[in-house]
Amino acid sequence: MKSVAVVGASGFTGRELLHLLRRHRGVRAVPMSARADAPPRDSDTQPLDMARLGEFDGVFLCTPHGAAATLAATAVAAGARVVDLSADFRLRDPAIYEQVYGAPHPAPEHLAEAVYGLTEHARPAVRSARLVANPGCYPTSVLLPLLPLCQNGLLDEAAPIIADSKSGASGAGARPTERTHFGNVHENFLAYGIGTHRHTPEIHQQLGSDRLVFTPHLLPVFRGILSTIYVTPARGIDDAAVRSCLMEHYGGEPFVAVLPDGTPELRDVQRSNRCHIAAHASGPLIVLTSAIDNLGKGASGQALQNMNLMLGFHETEALT
Amino acid sequence: MKSVAVVGASGFTGRELLHLLRRHRGVRAVPMSARADAPPRDSDTQPLDMARLGEFDGVFLCTPHGAAATLAATAVAAGARVVDLSADFRLRDPAIYEQVYGAPHPAPEHLAEAVYGLTEHARPAVRSARLVANPGCYPTSVLLPLLPLCQNGLLDEAAPIIADSKSGASGAGARPTERTHFGNVHENFLAYGIGTHRHTPEIHQQLGSDRLVFTPHLLPVFRGILSTIYVTPARGIDDAAVRSCLMEHYGGEPFVAVLPDGTPELRDVQRSNRCHIAAHASGPLIVLTSAIDNLGKGASGQALQNMNLMLGFHETEALT
Amino acid sequence: MKSVAVVGASGFTGRELLHLLRRHRGVRAVPMSARADAPPRDSDTQPLDMARLGEFDGVFLCTPHGAAATLAATAVAAGARVVDLSADFRLRDPAIYEQVYGAPHPAPEHLAEAVYGLTEHARPAVRSARLVANPGCYPTSVLLPLLPLCQNGLLDEAAPIIADSKSGASGAGARPTERTHFGNVHENFLAYGIGTHRHTPEIHQQLGSDRLVFTPHLLPVFRGILSTIYVTPARGIDDAAVRSCLMEHYGGEPFVAVLPDGTPELRDVQRSNRCHIAAHASGPLIVLTSAIDNLGKGASGQALQNMNLMLGFHETEALT
Amino acid sequence: MKSVAVVGASGFTGRELLHLLRRHRGVRAVPMSARADAPPRDSDTQPLDMARLGEFDGVFLCTPHGAAATLAATAVAAGARVVDLSADFRLRDPAIYEQVYGAPHPAPEHLAEAVYGLTEHARPAVRSARLVANPGCYPTSVLLPLLPLCQNGLLDEAAPIIADSKSGASGAGARPTERTHFGNVHENFLAYGIGTHRHTPEIHQQLGSDRLVFTPHLLPVFRGILSTIYVTPARGIDDAAVRSCLMEHYGGEPFVAVLPDGTPELRDVQRSNRCHIAAHASGPLIVLTSAIDNLGKGASGQALQNMNLMLGFHETEALT
């Protein structure tokens, strides 16, 4: 049995991780709360003690960005393997971090070793990493359908890519705010952060290109992200070729399914670590649709998938 | 006092019209049901009698496509002014109609005189029309922000336009189906009809171009459509120029508002005939967002706006 | 034209009042905000100035209990007619107020003149009142069906009365809290405050009896209260007699409808000042069901109904 | 490995059973569809072949009442152990069945041997039963809190018991109907079947008394039932005594939890076989609240719990 800490156990991603870890046959999980004022959901929740982080084989950081970087540095130095669910180690360039998050990076010396943990595209590096930056929920839903197409040259490299993404309210966090008040979400829908959302630089970095335009929306559901992505195929490429490329790339993957027909629905991926992808022709473009649970493959599910690899468990342990 | 018939009073658009007409100070409304099996919602609902359609000053057709064309022909011949909420007279070319709806057009001789009633863009023609084809809900939400930009040359004419639209469940009609079952809509979200939706040719016709790619989605709300539209500006045009153009075009309009900041939300337009529009820069593109109530400006509200013009009432009567 | 102030314009009841007052043909409404930190919803919102309250013909108080009492005393002394939507003047006995609200009553000298404004049962007193205590939302939904039956001796006076009430989330207020977070309301349902809810003493006072047992529940809807009330009829009384009594009592009322068959649904009363009531036999008991909009007849609608009477307008002005 | 058939695999309870059985380590499940027109959800679904029912160790019947009785008789005669999720064998008296369901009982010769499978109250009989009548969802939520109190004499036997129950839309079945249309459930709430619901005789039979008054309501959620039950305690009994009795009775149960404080919420039991119960004093009465998932402990979960006992598996297999 290995031991892992879940730091930031009172938020949605921390609670989801603890829920998943109850089924894990190889680890014992200890919830820790970084906030003195957070109501402990679980009587076993312990106050965060940074001196103890090295006692754990693995540490999940479910704390806000900024705070996570310092904790990660401490835990890594003490010998724990760390999966950071915050944004702190996703952007490789500290200058971009400062621009996006409005403060200097708290632990830039660890940026170089951090592995961007989109598992299906980083398996060997994740296995040996001390520090994994768990991808953002929106980037996960956008990158999984796009990366194989970009890497195989199926897209027109001059044309913009448009990702129109819609996320459930759990993406906005457990803290009560105007935005998450029932009266503002229920029977409502809106776009936000057009042209300015913090996940855009993260997607650009992973695509190696800034030609992606990203628009997030707030859905009146609790769980799930559906991204509708518009790409211009390279000359001679049609939707069948796109589907084939995706099926070939993800054919052996336990958590990514490319649908032969139909379109992804949130309910087929909710409460799972799965990503469902489809591709359809529409006029001169190809429309990719992808669905994940933002707390599953978009956060805690993928974090556990990564930690499983880091600690030598089967990748799907406690995830199926 | 004038008299109007609402044919197809048991569906969502018929009921909405009757609800609006109760506040109208100049007309007496008679609900008529075309379906023998439809449960009358209103004890005043009369069975449809085609011989009587000429007794009315105005006739609203809330019946399915196909059936509406025949009723329209009869009513127009008998001297009534007709607003048809079905798709029957939206497409000018009967060959395209047959291709889209799978049957020959039932009354092609009336296609030439039918006015496409996107009110803000067809006021004089609507005023004198005998037959108005009320626009589809999705096309209304897409055309209102796009038309002024196309007409004023603000868009790159070579680039595709992408309309990613999300509609509440009332758009799928009152008849119980798999798609509208609570269990399939609630806490769910999906795209449908990618590349094949029947509203695409209607939008293409009105834009005078087939470079628009349209993807509809089913939202877990009852009322409202939000369209997120991605356009490539012509050289030298930025989001401020786009906003100016829209504000100038719609400055005097009672039902169309261009937001100086923020983004449209469904709740700000629900149960109204309003359309809220915003424009933001995002990378090389401009993102237009527009919100309407699909039963309001997207159907019954716009139908009444048109009928008000046809019968000589103030355009906003019973709509504010 | 008369002038009215709406103090506490940023909460749900204040906003609803301002929405209703826009349609009022006899008053000009001034929104005032008591909270420096509240985001003004309306650019016309003025900071609260107690010295000015006497300038208004009428003052609506949409502030929290405790604060309202002081404002009411000031406004009444300055000559304004006041409708207080808080709980401050609902309980006649200051000792019970202190027990329920945990602090001495801030203006006990005004308790005697305050009229409990369940309009249909207090019309003459409301007309001449300087200060109306607007009933709570739950009490309104419970008292309207019960009072005629109690007053006419149709109920067994020895048996308990059970009111099982279910309210939408708008009843919990606009301030973001754990309870009103989308994730805690959506796809959830629960009872709360069993045996201890603050509205129980208010209902007991108006019934003149403490034999009513009240249980509130939080519904995943935004607007509406449905109360299911179980009463034991007096000997010889059946459901038909109960319906007759209610129909006779409310026959001429513009806002209360007793259904001859079927049961009340929230959607039939949402966004209205109506109350729908039904009575059915069920074993030895009679089951009363009543539906209101908690922001309508349960708060702002009834407040305006009362103010209309106080200022000499038709009772239904801006409410139909 | 044992084999079980799930007959009626296209409805909500059939699908839920198949979902649960995928995790079962001791059985292989075969979905069968009784309806030629039902869309097969699972490509493995086989058409119903009554001659084959004897090949299975266990048969779950998820078919409508009436049809289930004939299938049950066939399967039992062929040697299979049967759990019938329909209402066909819940009422012991065929005369009451005929009165409630409007047709003579199709297999009255099997009524005597059918065991009413409220597992916690019928374990030994379920273990040896050939035919288990799985309890209704509402009755399960009402009987679990009530039975220990009735059996131990904690209730005043002369007073009526009131069960005010609220169920999610999945209780109304997968077939599209007016009642389950998104537009009729979402942002709505209503009582139905007051004094006439078919589950009332089932509850009366199990209580051995007809003094229970039952009112069902339709909640705008997909999963879950919350019942609020009002009982009059026997002389000298308070809420602490009621809680003690329930805790003692259910202390060792894997699926029933009596809450020491707080109240049950739907989200704590959704997607589980659990029942959460609380008891609070309220005036002269005790208020019991109980929450289950209507597709879990209210249907498919309890059905599997029963089948586990019948086939010799651990009772909790595939249920935790």
Image (cartoon, coloured by chain):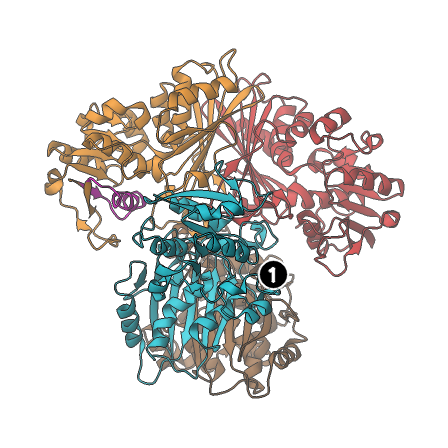
Chain colours: A cyan, B brown, C red, D orange
The answer to which image quadrant residue A309 occupies is: bottom left
Q: Residues within 10 Å of mark 1 (few under 14, many from 20)?
A: some
The answer, for residue B194, to whether it is visible in the render is no
> Which element is circle 1 on?
helix
Residue depicted at x 24% and y 22%: D124
Query: In the image, C70: left or right of B209?
Result: right
Please say if A253 is above or below B315: above
Q: Residue at x 33, y 38 (%)?
A: D320
Of A137 and C294, nearer the camera is A137
Return the residue nearer the eye: D75 or B65: D75
Q: Which span is picked out in magenta?
A: D4-26
The reply, left or right, for residue C88 in relation to residue B117 is right
Q: Is residue A72 magenta?
A: no
Residue picked out by circle 1:
B268
Vertical relation: B12 (above or below) A160: above
The x, y position of residue C197, in whole percent, is: 62, 31
Image quadrant where residue D77 sits: top left
Question: Is residue D15 a member of the stretch shown in magenta?
Answer: yes
Which x, y percent locates residue A253? 29, 61
Q: Can residue C166 be seen here?
A: yes
The amino acid sitting under disc 1 is Asp
